[in-house]
């Protein structure tokens, strides 16, 4: 997961600071030296690190901090604020033309950064906001690029325009503009060609498109996993053609986070979105304050709430709450709750957004947890409809049949049923949770 290593190192630094009742200037300098090393190891641009550490030190050695009641906590607060400033203190959105006017967005970036998929993700986002997007296939060089855009356009249910690979991109764009006008598309997203490295032909193609039509926003797609190289690419594109902002892809991968922390400072351009997965819905608005909170291991509850609101069916959630209250929670409900959690990105995604869980995540085998959930699903799906609705029906012979159907030992079926009963009891015991009003606080246990 992105930033794991950086988060661990920063939390170790802060733990030492918090353990001291009073801080000396030397304590702060030693701590910031460790912060500096952690940022450099995370592939943050060295000029950015130098400026960042200087800003923190100037604020941290002030009288208010050193003589405060909790100086360690104050230093952490300053680091958090400076991280937010580094990534851009405000959340920036791709600027659209006002009213019903058509907006033209040109996607740029190197081959392999995920530009074509990101173009479709972006189209899906704006469709949800009431726009009528048109994806335009201008990558005429990469095999299957046009087909890929077409498939993704169908998945997010947006229009797509292509003329094959025998026409110049500028001519495709001209024709796409006419098509959009006839069909009422008020957002045009141009998927341009990438190269393995920055070259003159690619830059000239982008310039030609901008000279042919009025491009309102040029959005650069960069692969966060390439670290400092992503920052260099962003700087080059900005200097050569000018960009309005960046979308970071593969931020969920084994990236050290340097790109997210450096791009805004180096280019002066905001990060609009971060792609956090392979699904076409995995494109999140980039909030500098929330990202800083995640990096410092403070969680990101706001994003978790928004994800829940977007993905969870409110009617089903209310219905499930009522069933809990009436003690009618059955295996179908359990299956539904697993489905809702998957929609939110799975176990690791949810735990990663909870405050204080960052440090504990490395001790939790979330992969094993996901496998256990899959096994649980197999057990429930091996039951008959009547058995799912009536857990009390499960006698030993039925359990043996279910175990055989799920391809597991009967002992695992028994363990799951026991945990299912514990979950039901827990929901009744924890006050206020899912409508429970029990006075005794139950010990929380994950249901697998």
Image (cartoon, rainbow, N blue to C red):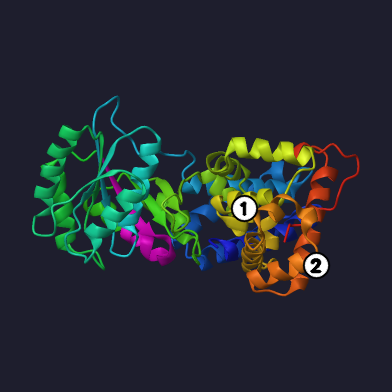
Give whichever of 56, 270 is nearer the camera: 270
Residue most extreme to the right: 440
Q: Looking at the figure, which quarter contains the N terminus?
A: bottom right
Q: Where residue 127 appears, x then y in whole percent?
A: 36, 38
Which one is closest to the eye, mark 1 or mark 2?
2
Q: On the rendered structure, is 152 left or right of 445?
A: left
Which residue corresponds to mark 2?
396
Question: Is residue 134 covered in magenta?
Answer: no
Residue at the location (19% across, 64% down)?
199
Give whichever of 230, 159 is nearer the camera: 159
Give whichever of 270, 339 is nearer the camera: 339
Q: Element type at marker 2? A: helix
Q: Is residue 57 visible?
A: no
Residue at the location (36% across, 39% down)?
126
Residue most extreme to the top: 99
Q: Where residue 242 appears, x then y in whole percent?
A: 25, 48
Q: Where residue 9 appears, x then y in whole percent?
A: 63, 64
Q: On the rendered structure, is 200 left or right of 327?
A: left
Q: Earlier in the sequence, mark 1 or mark 2?
A: 1
Which residue corresponds to mark 1?
350
Q: Is residue 165 above or below residue 311?
A: below
Q: Is residue 373 above or below residue 327?
A: below
Q: Where residue 105 appears, x then y in whole percent?
A: 26, 43
Q: Looking at the figure, which quarter contains the C terminus?
A: bottom right
| Label 1 to label 2: alpha-carbon separation | 36 Å
Q: What segment is highlighted magenta in the picture?
A: 217-233
Q: Element type at marker 1? A: helix
């Amino acid at each position: 997961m992105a930033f794991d290593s950086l988060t661990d190192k920063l939390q170790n630094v802060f733990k030492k600071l918090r353990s001291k009742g009073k801080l000396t200037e030397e304590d702060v300098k030693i701590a910031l030296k460790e912060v500096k090393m952690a940022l450099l190891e995370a592939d943050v641009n060295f000029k950015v690190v130098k400026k960042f550490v200087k800003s923190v030190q100037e604020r941290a050695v002030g009288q208010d901090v050193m003589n405060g009641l909790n100086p360690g906590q104050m230093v952490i607060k300053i680091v958090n604020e400076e991280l937010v400033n580094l990534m851009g203190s405000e959340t920036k959105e791709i600027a659209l033309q006002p009213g019903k006017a058509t907006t033209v967005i040109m996607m740029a970036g190197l081959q392999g950064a995920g530009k074509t998929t990101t173009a479709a993700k972006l189209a899906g986002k704006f469709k949800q906001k009431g726009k009528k997007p048109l994806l335009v296939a201008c990558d005429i060089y990469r095999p299957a690029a046009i087909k890929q855009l077409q498939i993704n356009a169908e998945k997010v249910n947006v229009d797509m325009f292509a003329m094959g690979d025998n026409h110049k991109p500028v001519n495709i764009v001209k024709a796409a503009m006419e098509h959009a006008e006839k069909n009422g598309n008020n957002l045009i997203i141009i998927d341009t060609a990438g190269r393995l490295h920055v070259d003159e032909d690619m830059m000239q193609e982008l310039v030609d498109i901008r000279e042919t039509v009025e491009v309102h926003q040029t959005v650069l797609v960069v692969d966060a996993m390439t670290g400092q190289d992503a920052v260099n690419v962003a700087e080059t594109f900005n200097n050569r053609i000018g960009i309005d902002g960046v979308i970071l892809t593969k931020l969920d991968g084994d990236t050290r986070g340097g790109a997210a922390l450096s791009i805004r400072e180096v280019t002066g351009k905001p990060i609009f979105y971060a792609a956090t997965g392979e699904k076409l819905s995995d494109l999140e608005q980039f909030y500098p304050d929330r990202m800083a909170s995640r990096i410092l291991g403070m969680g990101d509850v706001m994003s978790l709430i928004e994800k829940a609101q977007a993905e969870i069916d409110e009617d089903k959630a209310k219905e499930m709450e009522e069933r809990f209250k009436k003690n009618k929670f059955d295996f179908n409900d359990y299956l539904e709750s697993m489905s809702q959690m998957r929609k939110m990105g799975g176990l690791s995604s949810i735990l990663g957004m909870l405050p204080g869980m960052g440090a504990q995540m490395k001790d939790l085998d979330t992969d094993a947890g996901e496998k256990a959930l899959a096994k649980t699903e197999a057990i429930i799906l091996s039951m008959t409809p009547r058995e799912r609705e009536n857990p009390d029906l499960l006698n030993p012979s039925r359990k043996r049949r279910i175990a055989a159907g799920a391809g597991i030992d009967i002992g695992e079926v028994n363990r799951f049923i026991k945990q299912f009963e514990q979950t039901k009891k827990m929901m009744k015991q924890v006050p206020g949770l899912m409508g429970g009003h029990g006075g005794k606080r139950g010990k929380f246990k994950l249901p697998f």
